[in-house]
Image: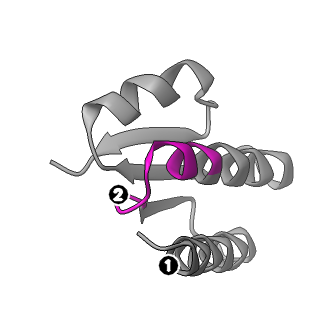
Amino acid sequence: MALNDINFQEEKVTKKIASFLCSAQNELTINISKLNFIDASRCALLNSTKCYVQNPYKKINWIVADENIKRTIMPFKLSNMEILTNS
């Protein structure tokens, strides 16, 4: 995936999170399975932290590409996030 594609994907996620935080919705599912391990980790952890700071009761479900990415992110998981696999 090219750098522009990654930036575009992360920009879309950031906009979804901002919209989610302003809504009455309590749970959001975001598919970041096209991102590699590093970008998926950064995206999920930073955006979940932002969400937790603004409203710790809102939950984000992150869909990642595979079990390896899931296992790597799990030790850093916040209480407001869930890590799911694409398959």
Q: Which residue is mark 2?
A: 33
In the rendered structure, the answer to whether residue 80 lies left or right of residue 74 reads: right
Sequence-earlier tag: 2 or 1: 1
Q: For numbered disc 1, what is the local secondary structure?
A: helix
Q: Is residue 33 magenta?
A: yes
Q: Quadrant of residue 24?
A: bottom right
Above or below 37: residue 79: above
Q: Position of residue 55 (x, y in %)?
A: 78, 52
Above or below 44: residue 82: above
Residues shaded magenta? 32-42
Q: For numbered disc 2, what is the local secondary structure?
A: loop
Do residues under tags 2 and 1 come within 8 Å of each other at their CB atoms? no
Residue type (three-letter) at the residue carrying disc 1: Asp
Q: Which of the two marks, 2 or 1, is nearer to us in this view? A: 1
Residue type (three-letter) at the residue carrying disc 2: Ser
The residue shown at (41%, 69%) is 1
The residue shown at (67%, 72%) is 14
Q: Which residue is mark 1?
A: 5
In the rendered structure, the answer to whether residue 60 lies left or right of residue 34 reads: right
Q: Quadrant of residue 4?
A: bottom right
Give the distance between the C-alpha atoms of the residues marked 2 and 1, in whole angstroms. 13 Å
Q: Is residue 26 magenta?
A: no
Q: Nearer the viewer, residue 74 or 82?
A: 74
Residue 76 visible in the shown view: yes
Q: Quadrant of residue 56?
A: top right
Residue 58 visible in the shown view: no
Q: Position of residue 74 (x, y in %)?
A: 49, 24
Q: Nearer the viewer, residue 15 or 66?
A: 66
